[in-house]
Image: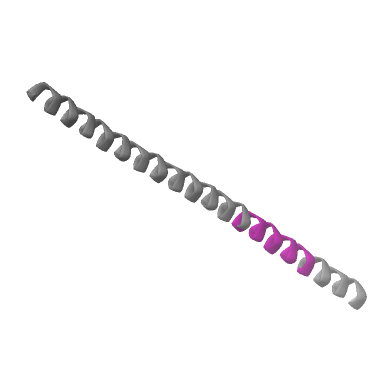
């Protein structure tokens, strides 16, 4: 009986370890998801930077056209 109780105790311990392992895997998954979102955010910031550069180029073009028009 004592041996069976010990086996049961070890079984419960193992189930708890498995539960912790599953929790850790879920945390890892969430971390990877967050890294992906961070990558997408950085990508969007780069696109925004290019957009601002293009707007500045467009502004210079308009200035040049206005200057040529005044000549």
Q: Is 29 in front, or is 1?
A: 29
State which quarter of the image contains the C terminus: top left
Instruction: Please say if 42 is above or below 52.
Output: below
User: Which residue lies at the image location 22% right of the left edge and 34% below the top edge?
Assistant: 60
Q: Is 30 in front, or is 3?
A: 30
Taking 21 as reference, is 4 left or right?
right
| 17 inside magenta stretch | yes
| 25 inside magenta stretch | yes
Among all residues in the image, which is located at the extreme bottom?
2
Question: Could you say where residue 23 lies in the image, as x and y percent from the top left?
Answer: 64, 59
Q: How is the image coloured?
A: one colour
Quarter of the view holding residue 64: top left
What secondary structure prevails in the magenta region? Answer: helix
Among all residues in the image, which is located at the extreme front?
71
User: Which residue lies at the image location 61% right of the left edge and 52% below the top edge?
Assistant: 29
Question: Could you say where residue 31 lies in the image, as x and y percent from the top left?
Answer: 56, 56
Instruction: Please say if 65 is above or below 17.
Output: above
Which span of residues is magenta-colored? 13-27
State which quarter of the image contains the N terminus: bottom right
Q: Is 61 in front, or is 18?
A: 61
User: Which residue lies at the image location 40% right of the left edge and 39% below the top edge?
Assistant: 47
Among all residues in the image, which is located at the extreme left?
70
Question: Could you say where residue 24 lies in the image, as x and y percent from the top left?
Answer: 65, 61
Taking 49 as reference, is 31 left or right?
right
Instruction: Please say if 54 is above or below 38.
Output: above
């Amino acid at each position: 009986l004592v041996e069976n109780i010990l086996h049961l105790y070890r079984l419960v311990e193992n189930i708890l370890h498995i539960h912790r392992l599953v929790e850790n895997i879920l945390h890892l998954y969430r971390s990877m998801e967050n890294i992906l979102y961070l990558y997408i955010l950085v990508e969007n910031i780069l696109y925004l930077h290019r957009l601002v550069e293009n707007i500045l180029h467009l502004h210079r073009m308009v200035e040049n056209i206005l200057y040529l028009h005044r000549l």
